[in-house]
């Protein structure tokens, strides 16, 4: 007669534990086969790109941001638009460039506050293998993949040629410019001055470089007109210069004697065009700059060919005589989100 083996509660527990451990091991082996590789999963994520502007408050840069967001949605990109609080703060831009490098951005779209002082940080991005697309304002780097901007020299000439056409007498010119190290402002100034000088009717040209704020432009313009009351033509070379100059001419009561040729548009500057503080506006296409910048980044990320490494966006001259035309209204009042 065989002896019955005594089965203790402890032996039952050990058996159950070993069985559970075996089943768990099988689950790990076969379950792991069905798990996606983390590296493969990362390749399915949206590509991260950064747009670094000069400002996030002006109408111009809000339009750039709108164009960039529209393109990012269309091309399924994870896009971040950042800008310093001041259009003078190139050091903040450099910090943003380096943050984009640390964040492993796939591309950077950039507008330089300072042509030279932003170059080192941009070159760091390029050396890290990040393609850089410049919009609006250039930077001193040979490694930039594409430049998308207004031909600023020709835009300045456009304003200067209109000034010559509208005033058949002697021209005494005041130029209200912003940061002397910003490439686009200097190119616009050169174009404007070349155009008026070619008329042979220029008595003098007085230039002031202001902080890129409406308040600074107001003070510079008022001081310029008080020192040189003979000035009859002003070139105001970006949106904030335009507003400051317009307010100064209005408050000094000289709108009938001084013609302002201004850059960029918003609701206030268009109103000044209507009421006579501003004679004409050279209107750029900031929405296109933002859109094309992101579209170009998408092409570079995906190794698609570029049609050109330089894209010239359009400019339009707007005056009281054409400001109500349908096509002009679309230019000066943009309804993008």
Image (cartoon, rainbow, N blue to C red):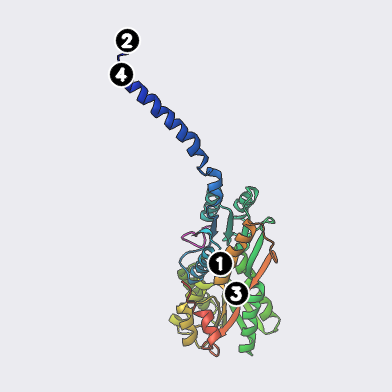
Q: Dot 1 lies on which element?
A: helix
In the rendered image of this protein, does residue 236 appear above or below residue 294? below
Q: Write down the residue under mark 2.
A: 3
Q: Write down the residue under mark 1.
A: 290
Q: Position of residue 298 (x, y in %)?
A: 60, 60
Q: Dot 2 lies on which element?
A: loop
- Of badges 4 and 3, the one in the foreground is 4
Crowdedness near tag 2: few (<14), some (14–19) or many (≥20) residues, C-alpha within 10 Å: few
Q: Position of residue 235 (x, y in %)?
A: 58, 77
Judge whether residue 161 is colored magenta. Answer: no
Q: Depth check: give the residue in front, 96 or 199.
A: 96
Nearest to N terminus: mark 4 or mark 3: 4
In the rendered image of this protein, does residue 228 appear above or below residue 101? below
Judge whether residue 82 is colored magenta. Answer: yes
| Residue at image coords 60%, 80% | 316
Nearest to N terminus: mark 2 or mark 1: 2
Q: Distance of mark 1 from mark 3, alpha carbons?
A: 34 Å
Q: Is residue 326 visible?
A: yes
Magenta segment boundaries in residue numbering:
81-89
Crowdedness near tag 1: few (<14), some (14–19) or many (≥20) residues, C-alpha within 10 Å: many
Q: Distance of mark 4 from mark 3, alpha carbons?
A: 100 Å
Q: Distance of mark 2 from mark 3, alpha carbons?
A: 118 Å
Q: Write down the residue under mark 4.
A: 10
């Amino acid at each position: 007669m065989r002896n019955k083996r005594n089965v203790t509660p402890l032996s039952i527990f050990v058996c159950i534990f070993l069985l559970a451990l075996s089943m768990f091991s099988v689950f790990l082996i076969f379950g792991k086969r069905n798990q996606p590789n983390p590296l493969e999963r990362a390749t399915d994520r949206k590509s991260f790109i950064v747009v670094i502007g000069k400002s996030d408050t002006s109408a111009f840069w809000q339009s750039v941001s709108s164009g960039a967001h529209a393109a990012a949605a269309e091309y399924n990109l994870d896009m971040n638009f950042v800008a310093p609080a001041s259009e003078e703060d190139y050091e903040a831009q450099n910090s943003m460039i380096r943050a984009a490098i640390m964040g492993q951005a796939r591309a950077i779209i950039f507008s330089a506050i300072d042509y030279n002082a932003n170059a080192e940080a941009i070159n760091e991005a390029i050396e890290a293998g990040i393609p850089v697309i410049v919009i609006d304002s250039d930077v001193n780097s040979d490694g930039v993949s594409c430049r998308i901007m207004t031909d600023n020299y020709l835009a300045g000439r456009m304003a200067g040629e209109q000034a010559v056409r509208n005033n058949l007498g002697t021209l005494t010119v005041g130029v209200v410019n912003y940061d002397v190290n910003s490439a686009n402002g200097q190119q616009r100034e050169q174009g404007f001055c070349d155009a008026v000088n070619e008329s042979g009717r220029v008595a003098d040209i007085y230039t002031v470089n202001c902080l890129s704020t409406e308040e600074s432009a107001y003070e510079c313009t008022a001081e310029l007109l008080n020192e040189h009351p003979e000035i009859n033509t002003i070139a105001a070379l970006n949106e904030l210069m335009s507003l400051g100059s317009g307010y100064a001419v209005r408050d000094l009561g000289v709108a009938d004697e001084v013609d302002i040729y201004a850059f960029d548009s918003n609701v206030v500057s268009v109103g000044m065009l209507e009421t006579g503080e501003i004679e004409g506006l050279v209107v750029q296409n900031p929405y296109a700059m933002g859109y094309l910048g992101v579209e170009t980044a998408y092409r570079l990320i995906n190794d698609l060919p570029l049609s050109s490494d330089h894209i010239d966006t359009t400019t339009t001259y707007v005056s009281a005589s054409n400001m109500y035309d349908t096509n002009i209204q679309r230019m000066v009042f943009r309804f993008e989100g």
